[in-house]
Image (cartoon, rainbow, N blue to C red):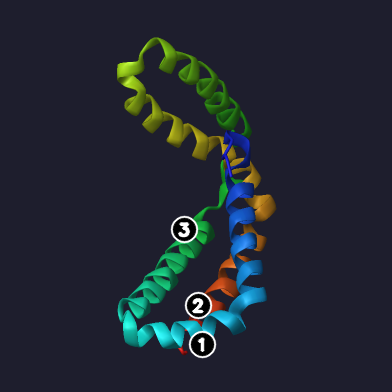
Amino acid sequence: MATTPGSLFEDLKDALKDFKEFLDQNINTIKPAIAALKSLVPQITELLDKLVELMGKLKTEIQNLNVSAIPGLAEASQFTEKITGFLNAMKTLLPEEASEIDSVLEVASLVTGLPSLDEVKAEILSLIDAIVGHLNTLKSA
């Protein structure tokens, strides 16, 4: 999954969908394995707890993003998309600044992808809820 600036939230949705579908198909196979692993690797419970916690944080962040109320967002997104093009070209000329340029690119990518968030927000939240449900099922193994 190579995130492009305009598809950041689509990529997130696709990754969540892929994970959910995997869990949908394999939860009944994974659950007994998790139960058996708990005695051998007690940290498995911590792993599941951490995943549930991170999914909760992701859900909160997505819920808090209300991009439809931001005036000029489309233009700001186009601005950051233009920035991305010349920053990528700049990395070739300034290789010693690659990490700093990458930091700026991460922010630009986030801003560029914001207009698409409203289109996929409900689906992302639904996928998060389904995944957390599966993770909680595994925790109860």
Q: CA distance from mark 3 to mark 1?
A: 33 Å
Q: Nearer the viewer, residue 98 or 62?
A: 98
Residue 99 percent across, percent down from the top left: 33, 28
**Mark 2 — residue?**
135
Task: Give the quarter of the image for residue 103.
Answer: top left
Q: Which part of the image, by quadrant, shows the N terminus?
A: top right
- Asked whether residue 20 is in view, the answer is yes
Give the SS element for disc 2.
helix
Which dot marks residue 32? 1
Of callouts 2 and 1, the N-terminal one: 1
Decide: marks 3, 2 in contact (CB < 8 A)?
A: no
**Mark 3 — residue?**
61
| Residue at x 42%, y 87% (from the top left corner) | 36
Closer to the observer: label 3 or label 1? 1
Q: Quick one: label 2, few (<14), some, or many (20+) residues within 10 Å?
A: some
Residue 38 percent across, percent down from the top left: 37, 85
Which dot marks residue 102? none
Drawn side of residue 50 relative to residue 30, left or right = left
Type of residue at label 2? Leu
Asked if residue 73 is positioned above or below residue 123 in the image, the reply reads above
Residue 26 percent across, percent down from the top left: 62, 76
Q: CA distance from mark 2 to mark 1?
A: 13 Å
Type of residue at label 3? Glu
Residue 86 percent across, percent down from the top left: 50, 16
Type of residue at label 1? Pro
Q: Quick one: label 1, few (<14), some, or many (20+) residues within 10 Å?
A: few
Give the SS element for disc 3.
helix
Of callouts 3 and 1, the N-terminal one: 1
Of callouts 3 and 2, the N-terminal one: 3
